[in-house]
Image (cartoon, rainbow, N blue to C red):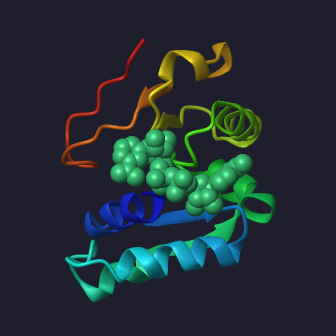
Amino acid sequence: MGAQIAAHFANAGIRVRLLDLSPEVAADGLKRALALSPNPLFTRDAKALIATGGFDGDLASAAGHADWIVEAIVEQIDAKRALLEKVDAVRRAGSIVSSNTGWFGAIRSSSRDGDFALTPSKNMPTSTFQRLR
Ligand SMILES: NC(=O)c1ccc[n+]([C@@H]2O[C@H](COP(=O)([O-])OP(=O)(O)OC[C@H]3O[C@@H](n4cnc5c(N)ncnc54)[C@H](O)[C@@H]3O)[C@@H](O)[C@H]2O)c1
């Protein structure tokens, strides 16, 4: 799902970093997503807008520069909490964090209150983005 979300941003002309447990896992996830039919990328050029990496080595630089950080890891509450805490420690002030989760209330945190939202599911990223408070 994360790779497909990354492709959707790239389709809109937005540079995106796709991170996973390791750079290899992220690259493999992107490869699998791009093998889907229909291809989630609208043009071949869009692929150049997606760079892959791993949480350990790339989270600080990616989250430190991003306007929007989309969490889309495995639906395990402890894993999401742990990753979001790492994101909070390095993200740029004013950035938005959103999550693909059914446990939105349970993973909210005062440190990202007001900057935290559910990832919009339709027409992203061109849809109206509503912050949930
Ligand atoms: N797949 C769908 O159709 C779909 C639809 C709606 C919402 N969602 C939500 O999107 C999110 C991702 O769904 P998915 O199907 O891609 O999940 P998934 O189970 O395929 O996991 C996504 C990624 O999480 C990584 N991961 C596994 N354990 C981790 C950990 N401990 N820490 C950090 N990363 C870890 C994996 O490497 C994997 O690439 C979930 O919250 C899910 O509920 C998925």
Q: Which of the 4 image quarters holds residue 38?
A: bottom left
| Side of 98 where 112 appears, left or right | right
Of residue 57 and residue 66, the one placed in the foreground of this image is 57
Residue for point 54% across, 64% down: 18
> Would residue 114 be visible to someone looking at this image?
no
Taking the view exactly as shown, the residue that stands out farthest to the bottom is 44
Q: Is residue 65 above or below residue 12?
A: above
Residue for point 57% across, 49% down: 73
Q: Is residue 17 above or below residue 28?
A: above
User: What is the x, y in percent for residue 81?
Assistant: 69, 31
Taking the view exactly as shown, the residue that stands out farthest to the front is 76
Of residue 30 and residue 69, the one placed in the foreground of this image is 30
Residue for point 64% across, 49% down: 63
Of residue 110 and residue 75, the one placed in the foreground of this image is 75
Residue for point 47% across, 82% down: 31
User: What is the x, y in percent for residue 62?
Assistant: 64, 57
| Side of 41 where 94 appears, left or right | right
| Side of 98 where 122 appears, left or right | left
Q: Which of the 4 image quarters holds residue 4?
A: bottom left
